[in-house]
Amino acid sequence: MEARITNFIKTRLAGDYQIWFIVFLLNIFGLLIQFSAKGKMFMGGPMVPILNIGKSIFLLAGSFALMSWISRQNYLKVAKYSNIFLIFSWILILIAFFFGENKGGASRWIDLGFISFMPSDMAKLCLTMSLAKIFSTRQADQSSYNIGVITVILIQIGITCFLVMLSNFSTAILIFLTSIVLMIFGRVPFKSIFLIMGIVGFIAGSVVTLGIGQRAATVKARLATYAQRTLSNTNGLKNLEDKDENYQLKRSWYAIATGALIPKGPGNSQYRFILSQAESDFVYAIILEEYGLIMGLAIPLLFLWFMWRGSSVIRYSGKPLGGLLSAGLTFSIVIQAFINMLVAVGAGPVTGQPMPMISAGGTSLLFTAISIGLILSISRDKEMETKDLKSVI
């Protein structure tokens, strides 16, 4: 029996075991907190909780199966078609924008009947692969970043961010932050990085100022609310109007204040019933309310551990593409997680970004699983090189 278990682990769980352990902990805890955070949905009848938890378990099992399969594949073959996938994601974003399902005031979903997904998540993954491929061939010579290469990089980042920000501004910011991290790791000259930052920043400012797309007005309102909250003389949220983002953020703060020091315990959250996005955007507030500061600190520490393991691949991967891709995907996941946590505690404007592996959401779970599967596949470089060395000896 023990031999079978060991053989199963070796054949199915390829790659860095520490990453597998972190991912397992985060996903299992995510399943528990989702079941609690969705409490208000369970008032529809006795079968609703059973169906809901069954769906969550099915999605979780599917994501682990997908991670396991991708971790055993050659990531170089996937990256080969990254440019094609990126252009395809642009087309899907436009289809979603003009013909997609409208949720939360924006058309960012494509409904296939059996599944709905956001192509912006696909674009984020594909852009990371495409940029990593460009940078991997120029690690030895910074002078190879001529005007033509910088133009290609700018076009890829600019088009992706522009299309995404038409309906999902926060995801566009996340994509841009990931691109900056990749450019730094890819040894792009800082002069070129600042140039790209300036141009993309101008595009973003124009979109908001001119009211282009479906989220410009919302972005303006959220930035104004955040500025009012942080720069004015108001006492936190006390004197701000009790509506929209302020309403949600107040409830998030109340949840944290009433449970951080004296946790209410699993399933005993009170504010899950009045926080409209308790299972996704404000899931961190529910974690602090039910599990207290200990778990509130454990979650970011687990993500930092994940970042360390994922980015450390760049040290021992024999292929520059592998190291850069792993670093980009890892930082994308971790940055998104910390954005979610900062929003819940009021340290940033409300964005609508779920916490990877913790928040509810099939699309997020799907593309996060693909990203982690690629990171695990890349982490096998060290193992493969060790085997090659032993064969030579």
Image (cartoon, rainbow, N blue to C red):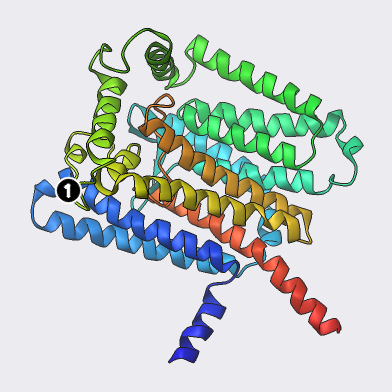
Q: Does 9 sit left or right of 298 as displayed?
A: right
* Front-most of residues 17 and 367: 17
For residue 254, what is the image quadrant?
A: top left
Q: Looking at the image, can residue 347 be seen? A: yes
Quick check: 273 left or right of 260?
Answer: left
The residue lying at 54 percent from left, 54 percent from top is 306
Q: Is residue 382 above or below residue 119?
A: below
Residue drawn 66% across and 68% down?
380
Residue 136 position (above or below residue 209): below
Left or right of residue 195: residue 343: left
**Residue furthest out toward the top:** 233
- Asked whether residue 122 is in view, the answer is no
Q: Position of residue 67 (x, y in %)?
A: 51, 63
**Callout 1: SS:** loop
Please tell me which residue lies in front, 42 or 155: 42
In the displayed orientation, state which residue is furthest to the left: 45
Quick check: 37 above or below 217? below
- The image position of residue 124, as x and y in percent, is 57, 41
Q: Amino acid at mark 1?
A: Asn
| Residue for badge 1 | 268
Q: Quadrant of the N terminus?
A: bottom left
Q: Is residue 161 left or right of residue 24?
A: right
Image location of residue 105, percent across then percent down: 34, 26
> What's the residue at 22%, 50% (across, down)?
36
Crowd class of label 1 (few under 14; some 14 to 19; many from 20; radius 10 Å): some
Up/down of 267 relative to 191, above or below: below
- Considering the image in quadrants, where does the C terminus appear? bottom right
Q: Quadrant of residue 144?
A: top right
Along the viewing direction, whichever of 159 and 333 lies nearer the viewer: 333
Residue 16: x and y in percent read 59, 66
| Total marks placed | 1
